[in-house]
Amino acid sequence: MAGPNLEVFKFGMYILFPISIMYYFGTNLDGKFTVPDFWPKPGQTHKIPYDRDEIAKELERLKVRNLENKRRREAQEGVGRGEE
C-alpha cells in the first residue's frame, strides 16, 4: 500500500491539472493564438456593387468573362480532340 503522500499527490494533480490548463488557454489569448495580418485589408477585398448601374456593369463584365472562358475551353477541347 502506498502512503498518504501518494494520495496527497494524486489529489493535487486532480485539482491543479485542470486549473493549469484553464489558466494556460484563458490568459493572453491574443498573444498566443492570433496570426498577424490574417484578414485582408479593406483595399484588398472585393467591393460589392449596390447601385443599379454598378450591378449592370458587373453583370456585363461577368458575362464577357464567362464567354471568354467558354471560347477558351472549346478551343482547348478542339485541340485535344484533334479537330474531328
Image: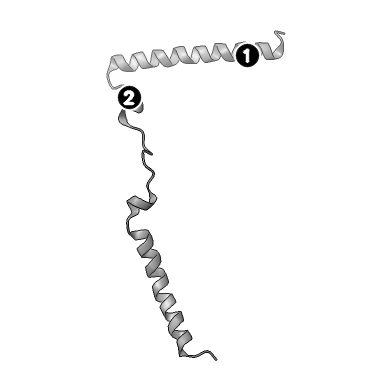
Residue nearest the viewer, comparing 26 with 51: 26
In the displayed image of the protein, which residue is found farthest to the top? 83
Please determine whether, in this image, residue 55 is positioned above or below residue 29: above
Q: Answer with the quarter of the image where residue 38 lies.
A: top left
Which residue does the image show at 32% across and 59% down from the upper left? 27
Q: Position of residue 62 (x, y in %)?
A: 43, 16
Which residue does the image show at 32% across and 55% down from the upper left? 28
Which residue does the image show at 35% across and 13% down from the upper left? 57
Q: Position of residue 15 (x, y in %)?
A: 39, 75
Q: Mark 1 or mark 2: name the one nearer the start of the chain.
A: 2
Dot 1, crowdedness within 10 Å: few (<14), some or many (≥20)? Answer: few
Mark 2, residue position: 47
Q: Disc 2 marks which amino acid?
A: Lys
Q: Position of residue 61 (x, y in %)?
A: 41, 14
- Tell me the colour scheme of the image: one colour
Q: Secondary structure at mark 1?
A: helix
Please determine whether, in this image, residue 60 is positioned above or below residue 27: above
Q: Disc 1 marks which amino acid?
A: Gln
Q: Position of residue 44 (x, y in %)?
A: 35, 27
71 left or right of 39 in image: right
Dot 2, crowdedness within 10 Å: few (<14), some or many (≥20)? Answer: few
8 left or right of 49 in image: right
Mark 1, residue position: 76
The alpha-carbon separation of the residues under discs 1 and 2 comes to 32 Å
Q: Secondary structure at mark 2?
A: loop
Which residue does the image show at 45% across and 12% down from the upper left? 64
